[in-house]
Structures are given as C-alpha cells and as structure tokens.
Amino acid sequence: MSPLPVVEADPKAIPLTLVTQNDLEAWRNAQSDAVQAWLGATGFKADSGEFCLISGADGALDRVIVGL
C-alpha cells in the first residue's frame, strides 16, 4: 500500500470533522455555544453517514460534521 500524497492545504477547502456516537458528547461540549445550539436544533446524533453543515460568522459554510 502506498502512502497518501502530501499536498498543500487549499484555503477554500471545507474541513470535515468526523465524530462517533461515543465521542459526540465530549466533542460537542468543546464547541462554541452557537455550534452546540445548532447541533441540538438539527438533532445531530452522529449516526453513521449523518452530516451537519456548520456556518461561520459570515454565514458561509465553515465545516461539515460527519457521523461515523
């Protein structure tokens, strides 16, 4: 198996945060109040394949949370 290629980070890339159900509570508690509220409002439970879009202060997509 060959190693993954190393590439420069693209400043336009949207980060993916992968979270398991077992780690959700601790991870969620480390997030800002706004992110915690949004996760609650959307009912995100980190089910396998579930995702939640998180916007930044400017309203643009900031990151995607993905359940494993």
Image (cartoon, rainbow, N blue to C red):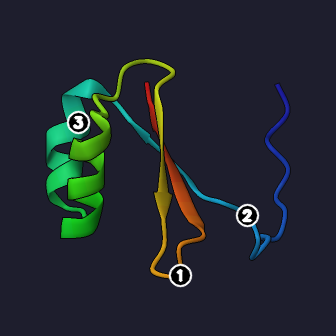
Q: Do the residues labelled 1 and 3 touch (CB within 8 Å)?
A: no
Q: Which residue lies at the image location 15% right of the left edge and 47% below the top edge?
A: 26
Image quadrant of residue 36?
bottom left
> The N terminus appears in which quarter of the rendering?
top right
Q: Which mark is on residue 13? A: 2
Q: What residue type is labelled 2?
A: Ala
Residue 59 in the image, given as x and y percentages of width and height: 53, 73
Helix, strand or loop under label 3: helix
Residue 28 seen: yes
**Cα distance between the residues tagged 1 and 3:** 28 Å
Q: Nearer the viewer, residue 1 or 51?
A: 51
Helix, strand or loop under label 2: loop
Q: Which of 46 and 4 is in front in this view?
A: 46
Image vertical order of residue 46 relative to residue 27, above or below:
above
Residue 3 in the image, given as x and y percentages of width and height: 80, 40
Q: Which residue lies at the image location 25% right of the left edge and 44% below the top edge?
A: 41
**Cα distance between the residues tagged 2 and 1:** 16 Å
Comparing marks 1 and 3, which lies closer to the viewer? Answer: 1
Mark sitting earlier along the chain (1/3)? 3
Q: Which mark is on residue 23? A: 3
Q: Name the side, left or right, on which 21 lies relative to 7.
A: left
Q: Which residue lies at the image location 21% right of the left edge and 56% below the top edge?
A: 37
Q: Name the side, left or right, on which 65 lies relative to 38.
A: right
Q: What residue type is labelled 1?
A: Asp
Circle 1 residue: 58
Q: How many labels does the image show?
A: 3
| Crowdedness near tag 1: few (<14), some (14–19) or many (≥20) residues, C-alpha within 10 Å | few
Q: Which amino acid does label 3 sit on?
A: Asp
Residue 66 in the image, given as x and y percentages of width and height: 48, 36
Q: Which of 30 and 62 is in front in this view?
A: 62
Looking at the image, which residue sits at the far top? Answer: 48
Residue 32 seen: no
